[in-house]
Every structure is written in C-alpha cells, then in structure tokens.
Image: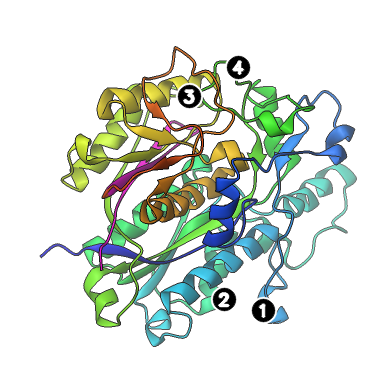
Amino acid sequence: MERRVVVTGGGLVSALGNDWDTVLGSLRLCRNKVIYMSDWERFEKMNTRLAAPVTDFRVPDFPRKKIRGMGRIALMAITAVDSAMREAGLLDHPEIRDGSCGVSFGSSAGSINALVDFYSMLVTNNTDGISATSYIRMMPQTCAANISVFYGLTGRLITTNTACTSGSMAIGYAYENIKSGAQDIMIAGGAEELSPADSAVFDTLFAASSLNDFPEQTPRAYDRKRDGLVIGEGAGVLILEEYEHAKARNAHILAEVVGFGTNTDGTHITQPNKHTMRKAMELALKSGNISSDQIGYVNTHGTATRLGDIAESMATWELLGKVPASTVKNYIGHTLGACGAIEALITIHMMNEGWFAPNINLTEVDPACGDLDYITGSGLDLKTDYVMSNNFAFGGINTSLIFKRMDE
C-alpha cells in the first residue's frame, strides 16, 4: 500500500504576519507590504529602491547558546520551524531525535553579512572581520544544518539551494522521502533574508520594479503596465508526516500532499520555457493520479516580469484552462528561497478557509498572458478539494505542488 503524506503543522515569518490569522487579515485588506528603502539611496546606478522587509521580526526566547552562531536567515527559519512544530504537536516528541524525522530546507544563499566578511578579506588583505561563526552563517546549507542541530535531528538532511524553487523543492523532496518510506516525518521549507544585492541582481537584468514613488502599486503581476519584481524576505515551513503515523497520534491534519513535479528547461539560465513549465505541472498531476479539471485554484509564481508572467500563465492556461489564479508576490514581493514554502502554506490555509486572495494591483491583464481566471476585487469564495502551487527559478528549474483538502 502506497504511503500517504500529510501536513500536520506550518509556520512562517513574513511581511504579512507570522501566523495565519494575521496573514489572513492582511490579505483581506488587499494592500501590499512594499516600502521605499531610503537606506538604498547610497547605491549609485541601482534603479530600484523598493523591498518588502519583515519589520516586526522578533526572535523567540531561545537559549543563546543554540542561536549565537546564526545569521538572520537561520533565525527566521528556526522561528518558523518552532511555530510549525508546536502546531504539529511534535516539539518534544521522542521520534524527533530517533532518526524518524529529517529536514529538507533551502535558500538562495546564506547570511549576506557573513559573506561580506569573507569577501572583505580579499579587498582589505586582513581577516579582522571573520569570526568563528562566519562560515556557519554564510554557508548555503546554514538553515538546514542549524535546524538539524537545534532540534537534535538524526534523520536525513536535504538542502535545496535552487533560488526561487528552494522552498518548494524542499517540500517536494520531503514528500518523496516520506512516500518512499525513508522517513516518517520531515521538516520542510525555505528562508531568505533581505539584501540589496539580491535586488541589484534583478536590477541589472532590468527585471526589478522602479516605481519608487508608488510602492503601494507594485509589483503588479500579469498587468499590462507591470515593470518588474520587488524583493522580500521571510521563512516558511511545513511539517510533513506519513498519514497513518499522524493519525496514530491524533494529529490535526491541515492538508494532504498529493502531487509533486519538477524538471529543468535545459535551454537558458534566466529565460523561462513554457513547455517545461507545463511539463512540471503535468508531472505533479501524474504523480497524484489527478486530472487537470480537478485543480480548483493555482497559486502562481507571478514575478511581475514580462517573460516570466507570459510563459507561466500560458503554460498554466494551456494545461488547466481558465482556472482561478492569484499570486502572493503582489503582497510581499519575491522572497526568493522562501517563496515556495510561504506560498504553499498560504495556499493550504486559503483552501481550508474557502477564500482565495485577489491579485492586487492587477487592473488590466496583459493580452500576451494566458487566459486564466485572474482573481481580483475582494477575492474569491470557493470550496475546492485540490489546489496547486507553482514556482520557477533561474537555472530553468521548475516545481509544482498539489495539495488536497482533508475533511476530518
């Protein structure tokens, strides 16, 4: 009998809030969290001055010895994991440390300040800025490794450093590990801390929004007048568990993971490919033995970039037809390695709520985009059993996750 995989807990750190009730309230206001970053005025020739920082982040009262070597990215990750583990009722569960629980977690990079410490050495010719924890804070696997040590995990460790698919890839690989019998529980997700360097990456590609005087109006994915993405930050976590294992301990189940698809374009590092995007969604449907007409809602990647929006929306429309769709990025910007996990968790909660957030800032759909049912206004009240969450990354990396509503 094939093993089923369910979600028994979730946690996040985001500009919308750090718990579902707060996030839901923020989404219903239909306003984004993008602000003008006056501190970025010092960067000459960088056009964008916009970002969506987490302004109210507070580290819980963790033992100092456990967190002193962590950068902001790992601290956000641990904070989100702590919330998820509490919701799942696993915080002090004995199986956490007996090898039954693994971690699958990703980010684009480690803590940027620690990276700067090392790079400064090459400019100043001295190592004064490097400490005993600098590498631990900068390494790309900093979140996964710190989560493992913090909770004393002895199961598998998977680190997914695949840019914008880091969080969704982590969830997908965790799902496969439980489904195959390799683990019973997995902590899965992604995180990213805000850095002007990340904005500069997209600025040099003319893919970052420069509506600096109107932060409330951007990003505006799928809109004819969109001018690019805005960088955000945060962390998202799902606790995945084998279904019978979860039922045996009377865990509350948020949703079932029923599909995962991933592939690569094999054509270009930065230009999206609608054909392989569609294939990733098809793989997710096939893995769950689900037909395309069963998907009631799609949480899109929705970067508000010209090529990305067109390719993704066309791929989605060609496969799923005029399916209801919206993007979280219009609210909190592109959280890079965190987006796949944050968006998956929000998608699950919206499914259970029976309400899906609208595409704010979308006033006129670009005619070059696919003919989806782009949710606008005050959102969409809809009861559906299946939802899809998609993410696509530099390197031509595509992911698609499908979740099923659970009636207990």
Q: Is residue 395 magenta?
A: yes
Label 3 Cα neighbours within 10 Å, binned few <14 / some 14-19 / many ≥20: many
Instruction: Identify the image quadrant of the N terminus.
Output: bottom left
SS of the residue under disc 4: loop
* 158 up-or-down from 33: above or below: below
Which residue matches tag 3? 309
The tag earlier along the polypeptide, 2 or 4, is 2
Which residue matches tag 2? 150
Q: Residue furthest left?
A: 1
- The amino acid beneath tag 4 is Lys
Q: Are the two marked residues, 1 and 3, in contact with CB atoms closer than 8 angstroms?
A: no
The magenta segment: 386-408
* Residue found 64% across the figure and 40% down from its top: 32
Q: Are the two marked residues, 2 and 1, in contact with CB atoms closer than 8 angstroms?
A: yes
* Residue found 82% across the figure and 23% down from its top: 45
Q: Nearer the viewer, mark 2 or mark 1?
A: 1
What is the number of the mark on residue 336?
Answer: none
Q: Indicate left or right for 199 with 245 as reference.
A: right
Mark 2–mark 4 distance (CA, rounded to whole Å): 46 Å
Which of these two is toward me, 162 or 327? 327
Main structural element of the magenta stretch: helix, strand or loop? strand
Q: Indicate left or right for 70 with 262 as reference.
A: right
- The amino acid beneath tag 1 is Phe
Which residue matches tag 4? 225
Which residue matches tag 1? 62
Q: Nearer the viewer, mark 1 or mark 4?
A: 4
- On the image, which quarter does residue 18 sit in? bottom right
* Residue found 57% across the figure and 76% down from its top: 150
